[in-house]
Image (cartoon, rainbow, N blue to C red):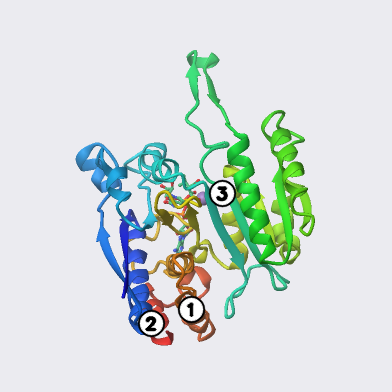
Amino acid sequence: MKVYKIAVIPGDGIGKEVVPAAIEVLDRVAELDGNFQFEWTYFPWGCDYYLEHGEMMPIDGIETLKQYDQIFLGAVGMPELVPDHISLWGLLIKIRREMKQSINVRPAKLLAGLESPLKNPRNFDITVVRENSEGEYSDSGGRIHQGADEIAIQNAIFTRKGTERAMRYAFELAKNSRGSVTSATKSNGLTYSMPFWDEIFEEVRKDYPEITTSVNHIDALAAFFVMKPHEFDVIVASNLFGDILTDLGGAIMGSIGIAPAANLNIEGEYPSMFEPVHGSAPDIAGKGIANPIGQIWTGKMMLDFIGQQKAGTQVLTAIEKTLASGIKTGDIGGTSTLGEVKESILSYL
Ligand code: NAD
Ligand code: IPM
Ligand code: MN
């Protein structure tokens, strides 16, 4: 029996509700398979922990997490009590960076039984590869002067290694997909980062002559996500552009509450982290109405990553059957609770 040791960080808000639901589904699918199981270890890190201890996780938190095979995280953030840059840089972004989870894979595709807000969505199936450890997300910068002359400076740092790694990952994915990679740029407005990004894309694509490529400015690409999402296969984007594009990806699927994500350490040196696109949704937290599908589909991405693809497919099929049967939370036009959606998915496994 293969046993996977998973560190669980439910985090804040609806993270605490959707994570237990996803774990029930993952345990059930493992039990049905019979050849593997999960050993979950819970870590109560997040904003409540911060309010008590003055830090988002213990000082040796990263070392602790390194002992696990993978990390399963809900969401982080309690913006009314803890400034977001403190909570996110103290936990989520810290883990991504220190565990070198430099690739964030975020699919957006039309699921059976779900209605897209687009009038004519056709059958889109996009994978956004988001650079996850550098770029616009940097702690380099500062604030100078005061009063009317005050200035805030936020540097974006793009390394050749990091940029090339994200691009090569996208091209490798495209080989097993529909053979096309689109690069999200903005080299018309940004004078250093994006011209550099474009140059590297031009170099990398030469190594993949069988892959069709295109380059779009991020503003136009955002519009294309609405007008013709079916034309895209794999998209490679910087940290910030990928962030924005994937909430939009969730929205065109029907809701950001269903969008899954995987923060990958592709070198296999440290655990990867599986955490959906959405946040802690303070506006609906504690009501039992959050959509658990983003977290459950994220669990499917973890199953695929650890080599349990059969179980992964089973989970996605059960999600689609649930949607097709009309059992949906409010964000996607239904009236079901989180618990009802979970029970339905369990019953279809
Ligand atoms: P959010 O994703 O939490 O919520 C945006 C909107 O989508 C809200 O109206 C919310 O109710 C809805 N929504 C999100 N997930 C849903 C679900 N599963 N079911 C139904 N509706 C859902 O984004 P936000 O409001 O910008 O951020 C709230 C907090 O979460 C902030 O502190 C933010 O920094 C944090 N955040 C954390 C993560 C993460 O940990 N991965 C991601 C995004 C935002
Ligand atoms: C996400 C989130 C985070 C990000 C925030 C909360 C820092 O929006 O995972 O998409 O921007 O990466
Ligand atoms: Mn985001």
CB under 8 Å between discs 2 and 1: yes
Q: Secondary structure at mark 2?
A: helix
Give x and y (percent) for residue 331. Answer: 49, 68
Query: What number is the disc on residue 310?
Result: 1
Give x and y (percent) for residue 300. Answer: 46, 70
The amino acid beneath tag 1 is: Lys
The amino acid beneath tag 3 is: Asp
Give x and y (percent) for residue 121. Answer: 70, 70
Asked which quadrant contains residue 14, the reply is bottom left
Q: Earlier in the sequence, mark 3 or mark 2?
A: 2
Instruction: Give the alpha-carbon distance from disc 3 to disc 1, as whole Å.
Output: 29 Å
The amino acid beneath tag 2 is: Asp
Q: Secondary structure at mark 1?
A: helix
Query: What number is the disc on residue 243?
Result: 3
Give x and y (percent) for residue 95. Answer: 39, 45
Write the residue at 30% across / 46% down.
47
Q: Left or right: 145 with respect to 236? A: left
Q: Residues within 10 Å of mark 1 (few under 14, many from 20)?
A: few
Q: Earlier in the sequence, mark 3 or mark 1?
A: 3
Closest to the observer: 282 or 45?
45
Is 35 placed above or below 12 here? below
Is 151 placed above or below 320 here? above
Instruction: Give the alpha-carbon distance from disc 2 to disc 1, as whole Å.
Output: 9 Å
* Ligand 1 quadrant assignment: bottom left
